[in-house]
Amino acid sequence: MNPAAPTPLGHCRWAIAEGYIPPTSSDPDDPRLVSHEAACLLNCNSEEAHVSLHIYFKDREPAGPFRVTVPARRTLHLRFNDLSDPESIPRDTPYASVIESDVPIVVQHTRLDSRQAALALMSTIAYAGDAH
């Protein structure tokens, strides 16, 4: 007798309503201290996750899709600063994002603001927009 397959962990659709990449950093030469925005993607599945992101702005059409793959049983810390195809995400501009995956994943949102020597780090779970 086969045990039941485990319930997938996560959701296939996520939203981060708050996004902002600070325009400067206290030490732009140290990658650990560069101001950034990130989506931490966790794939607990036995198959890879094909993920697409769309970025929404206040005063222009959305950007994307940006596409990444998260290998099976792995995590990917995706810095929005590093996205460049089909375009770069502008600094010092508020935005929001929608993240969709073909398998359930977990998404956490993080921002490091290092414009001052006293760093600020913010992190929160994204909004899950489906019933998986």
Image (tube, rainbow, N blue to C red):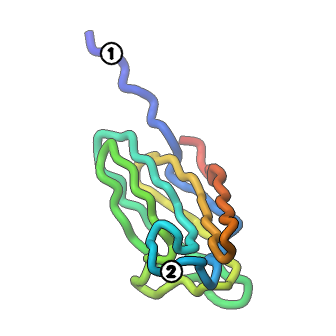
State the image coordinates of residue 92 (x, y, percent, origin top left): 67, 85
Helix, strand or loop status at disc 2: loop
Disc ID at residue 125: none
For the point 54% across and 83% down, the residue is 89
Q: Quadrant of residue 123?
A: bottom right
Of the two numbered discs 2 and 1 in the rendering, the one whose residue sits closer to the viewer? 2
Q: Residue at x 69, y 74 (%)?
A: 116
Amino acid type for the residue under numbered disc 2: Pro
**Reading the chain from its start, which is encountered first: label 2 or label 1?**
1
Q: State whether residue 61 is above or below residue 51.
A: below
**Local crowd size for mark 2, using a 10 Å CA cut-off: few (<14), some (14–19), many (≥20):** few
Task: Looking at this view, name the residue that lies furthest to the bottom.
Answer: 60
Spot occupied by residue 7 in the image (x, y as percentages of width and height): 45, 30
**For this rendering, which residue is in front, 6 or 81?**
81
Of residues 88 and 25, which is closer to you in this image?
25
Residue type highlighted by circle 1:
Pro
* 112 with respect to 32 (left or right): right
Disc 1 residue crowd, few under 14, some 14–19, many 20+, Cα 10 Å: few
Residue at x 27% of width, y 15% of height: 2
Between 34 and 80, the one lying in front of the other is 34
In the picture, which quadrant includes the N terminus? top left
| Disc 1 target residue | 3
Q: Which residue, as the protein is rendered here, is positioned at the far front?
A: 117
What residue does disc 2 label? Answer: 28
- Asked whether disc 2 touches disc 1, contact meaning CB atoms under 8 Å apart, the reply is no
